[in-house]
Structures are given as C-alpha cells and as structure tokens.
Image (spheres, helix red, strand yellow):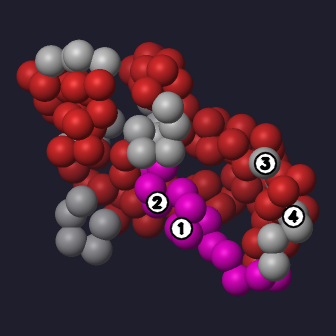
Amino acid sequence: FNYLGARSQVKQILESEVFGLMCAFLENFDMKELWRPCVPQLKLRIYQFGRLLHRKLPDLEAHFSDIGVTPDFFASQWFLTLMSYNLPLDLVVRVWDVLVIDGWKTIFRVGISLLTTFKEDLMTVQ
C-alpha cells in the first residue's frame, strides 16, 4: 500500500481515500486471500490467466512455454497491485473504475490486452 500511497500523492489524492479504496477492494474482491500463507487466490488467478492466455493467444503462450516463461513471471504483479505498478496513474484510475463494476475479469482483460499490444515484440524474445 505504500506504493499506492506514494503514487496518489503525485495526483494529490488524499491518503485516506486511497486507504478506503484499498479496504473496499480487500473486502469486495476477497483480495485478502492474495496475501494469505501459500497465496491461494494468487495461484488460482495465475492458473486462470494461463488458461485464458492459452485460449486467446495460443501462439504467444506456446512461445512463452518454449522459452521457459510462465504467467506468474509477469501476471503476479498485475493481480497483487491491480495494475497500479505497471500502468500510468491515469490508466490505473480507468482500470479501477471498470474493476469496481466488473470485478476480477477486468485485470484479466487488461492483461490480455497488454500482451496483445506487445505480442509482436514478445514473440522475438529469446
């Protein structure tokens, strides 16, 4: 939460508002399970994302498999920070707006969109 608090100061959002929003996410999206011992929900979300990647971008998923990259390598941070670490704040605000309405599938959609956007470059990585 310190990272979110620091980013919020850039846009002069009150720390208490960010704290309240994160508390709402923790309660409404059962995010507490992300940080429990053995991170049960994170493992589930990564597994689900891997299956979605296989279905939506099979050639990229196969390439990742060939070079030994698993979805937890990049997607763990997406789920743990709700994209706040990887996207500019103006986009994070939009993602969170949709997240409030659509829930977890928002993070899946944004993740697939990011991979689709950078697919050509990712396919050249060895």
Q: CA distance from mark 4 to mark 1?
A: 18 Å
Q: Which residues are magenta?
A: 66-79
Give the label, 3 or 1, closer to the camera: 3
The picture places residue 77, in percent across and down from the top left corner, at 44, 56
Q: Quadrant of residue 24?
A: top left
- Marks 4,3: beta carbons within 8 A: no
Determine which of the numbered discs, if any, sits on residue 76 in the image: 2
**Helix, strand or loop under label 2:** helix
Q: Earlier in the sequence, mark 2 or mark 4?
A: 2
Q: CA distance from mark 4 to mark 3?
A: 9 Å
Q: Quadrant of the N terminus?
A: top left
Q: Earlier in the sequence, mark 4 or mark 3?
A: 3
**Helix, strand or loop under label 4:** loop
The picture places residue 98, in percent across and down from the top left corner, at 50, 19
For label 3, the residue is 118
Q: Name which residue type carries label 1.
A: Asp
Give the label, 2 or 4, closer to the camera: 4
